[in-house]
Amino acid sequence: LFGTAEARTALDERFAASLPAASWPGGRGLELNEKEALHFTPVVLDLHSVADGIIGADVWGNRAVSIDYTAGLITYQKEGIHPELMTIYRFTSDPRVTIVVDGKPVEAIVDTTSPDTLTLPRGAAPAGRTHARLQLGGADLGNLDIHLADVSEPRVGNRILSKFLVTIDYGKRVVGLWRDPRTL
């Protein structure tokens, strides 16, 4: 999985045990192509068969990555973000954007490991699903179902992010969203 908000890369303990001894730590790392590999030291833990691993921000360092959901492509960008025609959001810890929920701006973590739309802290409300009018990156997304759960911070997931080309520049600490016309 690609975990934009995960600080460290994690490997499932069963997957890590199956790797050749030279792979971790001190191996080549994540091979992007025949000439380029990104070095990192993952944490090893039980991912409960969800995935073999979650690639975190430690892999990208101070570089940028773009996610094109429609093409199914993640692009590593050495030169950083290209903000033309994008709505830009600055962040200090986890990558975040401002999503407008029923007219109120809410800072939400960009969570590419979440298959959901938006997960909000439930507060005193019962856990479960509800609906809200959502706006993000200058686009009115309409009335969508959202998840109220026991989370400490709001998290925007792939069902919304997939409407955009998402670029995260970890070095400049910005998220750029461009409304993808292929998803209108």
Image (cartoon, grey):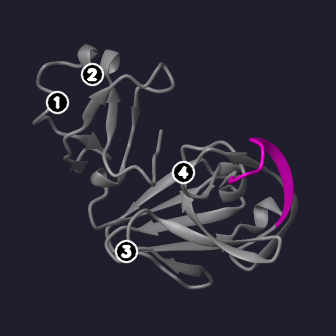
Q: Earlier in the sequence, mark 2 or mark 1?
A: 2
The residue that disc 2 covers is 16
Instruction: Work out whether residue 109 or residue 170 is closer to the camera in this orientation and state it.
Output: 109
Instruction: Work out whether residue 104 or residue 63 is closer to the camera in this orientation and state it.
Output: 104
Position in image of residue 84 (x %, y %) = 56, 85
Residue for point 20% across, 45% down: 40
Q: From the viewer's perspective, tell me whether residue 88 is left or right of residue 22.
A: right
Residues in magenta? 123-133
Mark 3, secondary structure of its residue: loop
Q: Earlier in the sequence, mark 3 or mark 2?
A: 2
Q: From the image, state whether disc 3 or disc 2 is nearer to you.
A: 2
Distance in Å between CA atoms under marks 4 and 2: 25 Å
The residue that disc 4 covers is 73
Crowding at label 1, few (<14), some or many (≥20) Cα neighbours within 10 Å?
Answer: some
The residue that disc 3 covers is 80
Task: Answer whether residue 184 is magenta in the image.
Answer: no
Up-down relation of residue 67 to residue 43 (above or below): below
